[in-house]
Amino acid sequence: MNESNRSAKHYDMVVIGSGAAGHHGAIQAAKLGKKVAVVERSIALGGASINTGTIPSKTLREAVLRSTRSGSTDRRISASILALRIEEIASHEVRVFESQFRRNDIDVLIGTASFSGPHTIRVASQEGEYFCHADHVLIATGSRPAHNDAIPVDDVSIIDTDAIRRFTNGAPCVDHRRGWRDRY
Ligand SMILES: Cc1cc2nc3c(=O)[nH]c(=O)nc-3n(C[C@H](O)[C@H](O)[C@H](O)COP(=O)(O)OP(=O)(O)OC[C@H]3O[C@@H](n4cnc5c(N)ncnc54)[C@H](O)[C@@H]3O)c2cc1C
């Protein structure tokens, strides 16, 4: 253990990943009186359910249905309007996550987590690296879209769900650390 490891903050539990699994695990542990940190490598908390899966897919569906509903004044809908609607809903959900973490005194550490010892987590980001210790580690790192060689995902005519928010170039995207910015 080097000097920086020795001065690392100690937690009862460190959760790697802030998706649905990490979020619930962290909140439950905090409610049991544990000191918890969540490590997230993405610029937005919430994992697939908020950023690429559940919320974006349902928001997309509802936005299309609403704009094409009979009686709607504008039946044309652009990709950038859809993207903005997704951003609006997703950024609200991210803020709900942030507030729940704050209320439960959960630290959010931004960076990519890896093990540097059985109970030591290294968190690496563009700003550098730091370490924390944990009695327990919950690995909730999720999954990614499965691809099939016979169906090439070219990000033009065939996209996967991870690309849903890249759909419209230059669409503003919320960065929970810096506010609105251009993500893509
Ligand atoms: C299009 C679509 C629609 C869906 N619709 C529904 C639905 O209607 N209802 C439903 O129940 N489910 C739905 N799902 C499934 C749901 O989104 C997933 O089951 C859920 O998001 C899984 O949560 P998770 O926490 O396990 O993983 P994820 O949400 O993938 O979260 C993992 C997190 O870990 C982070 N991470 C990974 N590695 C590291 C690391 N080394 N260091 C730091 N952070 C890391 C990732 O950045 C990510 O934020 C849908 C999924 C998709 C793709």
Image (cartoon, grey):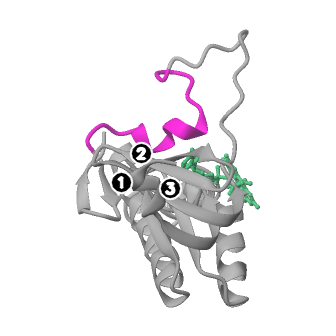
Residue position marked by numbered label 2 in the rendering: 124
The verdict on label 3 being within 8 Å of ligand 1 is yes
| 117 or 153, nearer to the observer | 117
| 180 or 14, nearer to the observer | 14
Give the amino acid type for the residue marked by disc 3 in the picture. Answer: Glu
Residue 179 forms part of the magenta stretch:
no
Residue 169 forms part of the magenta stretch:
yes
Residue position marked by numbered label 1 in the rendering: 81
Q: Which mark is residue 40?
A: 3
Whichever of labels 3 and 1 marks the residue nearer the N terminus, that label is 3
Quarter-of-image position of residue 133 = bottom right
Whichever of labels 2 and 3 marks the residue nearer the N terminus, that label is 3
Q: CA distance from mark 3 to mark 1?
A: 28 Å
Disc 1: CA contacts within 10 A as few (<14), some (14-19) or many (>=20)? some
Residue at 39% from the left image edge and 54% from the top image edge: 4
What range of the chain is rendered magenta?
Answer: 155-170
- Considering only vertical position in the picture, is 22 above or below 161? below
Whichever of labels 1 and 2 marks the residue nearer the N terminus, that label is 1
| 18 or 184, nearer to the observer | 18
